[in-house]
Amino acid sequence: MRRLSRRRFLGVLGGAAAAAGVGVPFVSGIAGSTSTGEQLVSRVPLPRPYTLPFAVPPVLAPARSDAAGDHYEIVQRAAKAELLPGVPTEIWGYNGIFPGPTIVSHSGRPTVVRHRNELPVPVVVHLHGGRTPSSDDGYPTDLLMPAGTPGGRQHHMSGGHEGRMSDPAASISTGERDYRYPLQQRAATLWYHDHRMDFTGPSVWRGLAGFHLVGDAEENALPLPRDERDLPLMIADRAFGADGSLLYPSLDPTLARPGVQAAYGSGVLGDVILVNGVPWPLAEVSATRHRLRLLNASNARRYRLALDPPPPGGGGLVQIGTDGGLLEQPVRHDAIDMAPAQRYDVVVDFGAYGVGQEVTLVNQFGTGSTADVMRFRVARSGRDDTRIPDRLSRVPRLRPADALATRTMRFQHDDVHGMTGWTINGRPFAPGLVHARARLDSVEIWRLTSDFHHPVHLHLAPFQVLSRGNSGPGPYDLGWKDTLDLQPAEQATIIVRFDGYTGRYVFHCHNLEHEDMAMMGNLVVF
Ligand SMILES: [Cu+2]
């Protein structure tokens, strides 16, 4: 385990700095204090913003449905995609597309997804926001080896990794495997993405991400916008090389060995904002209410999203939901801050604008090309029988008095054994190293502290935010969360009930470069 940590930390800082044990976190001057990371610069002519048509990822049809649930099949493979007009870009995609196909499930109806791996590297699939048994949660060493891998486990577990990944508890499959999701959970906007230990950043960057929407009877009974007026928006930054390839500063472009170039050890940012895989798209909408399911699928970038111009009276982003589904009541925002992996469901009433008017979704944390996100053109009038009820759902509060344990988790850049890297409580991730053991059904309070921006994500169990610093929850902390936007030098307190399943899970920073560089811990529910 020592060697594991050491090697990974070398990946954070690279060569001389690491050898000298000197580590300076890089916080981008370009992005100011709004994101922790360093921005890549594209080397290919980029399209003018708001010239390419908006698109929604296709909804995947089940291969079959029976009493046991709905069965889906996905092949993970490399493909050429036209992300930039006329320029092919090699991506890694679920069914060869980015974003991957959207899976639509109903609460409580089991969903089984058979993944086949035709990529040259092992993969792991995690359903982010899923209440999933440990065996199917996508533990970072539960690898699905490429189809046709000779010798399966031995080949890849030892090859090129010097035994660093050896995890006796890992469950290794070759070629294909089923992920079983009971989905005993309320309606919410989930997403699925790669989660391989050390390689989540480059794998997601190459395209391994898709939506998984869960609906339920409660939400269906509400008069909210639906169907073609319910739009998932996967927002992700990328950068492109001169040949149209996706730029990513891996130390080893074949992704056999982990790590990014030293300058990017604090996070990789791109200068192109993609929405559902399209750079700065233009959507034509009717002058009616639309539900926008906002997902920040970026590796490290934070956004402050706002409508320009705002509607008369302001408050144009009406938040109805978040990571873990509906809020109790709608909340009007002029802007919404989003850390990586977070979801915010909002309703925008384009009826507040005139036909012919254009409304731009801007990123107030961005500068230059990253200040633009997408544009809506109100193209026609429309009949609108939707509304936003004052009461959306019930969110029973977890009570601090019920907490069985209180833990502190420090997310920070750290020195360990003369090396520097990203750690939780000074300890880098290792499969056998347990940060927390929680009794099934118990309530716990976690105090989270940070040095830089760290979006903290817990698997299995959603949480509620009790406080930030000396104040109550922030304006974006309402409802059931699974990812907290922890700010530099901040302490936040969350409360969580570990129910559903026993087994080993992870919690981690969702800045994917921090995660890959060991800012992850084991959470064992027993
Ligand atoms: Cu982090």
Image: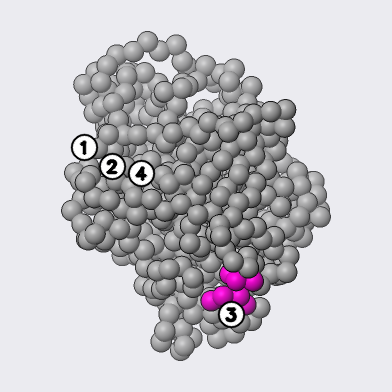
Give the extent of the magenta segment: 154-165
SS under mark 1? loop
Q: Earlier in the sequence, mark 3 or mark 1?
A: 1
Q: CA distance from mark 4 to mark 3?
A: 36 Å
Q: Amino acid at mark 4?
A: Gly
| Circle 2 residue | 280
Quadrant hosting residue 325: top right
Residue occupying the point 64% across, 22% down: 217
Q: Quadrant of the C terminus?
A: bottom right
Looking at mark 1, is its residue's CB closer than 8 Å to ligand 1? no
Q: Is residue 201 left or right of residue 185?
A: left
Q: Amino acid at mark 1?
A: Thr
Q: Position of residue 470 (x, y in %)?
A: 57, 53
Residue 219 in view, yes or no? yes
Label 2 with label 1: CB-CB less than 8 Å: yes
Looking at mark 4, is its residue's CB closer than 8 Å to ligand 1? no
Q: Residues within 10 Å of mark 4 (few under 14, many from 20)?
A: many
Q: Position of residue 73 (x, y in %)?
A: 56, 40
Q: Earlier in the sequence, mark 4 or mark 3?
A: 3
Q: Earlier in the sequence, mark 4 or mark 1?
A: 1
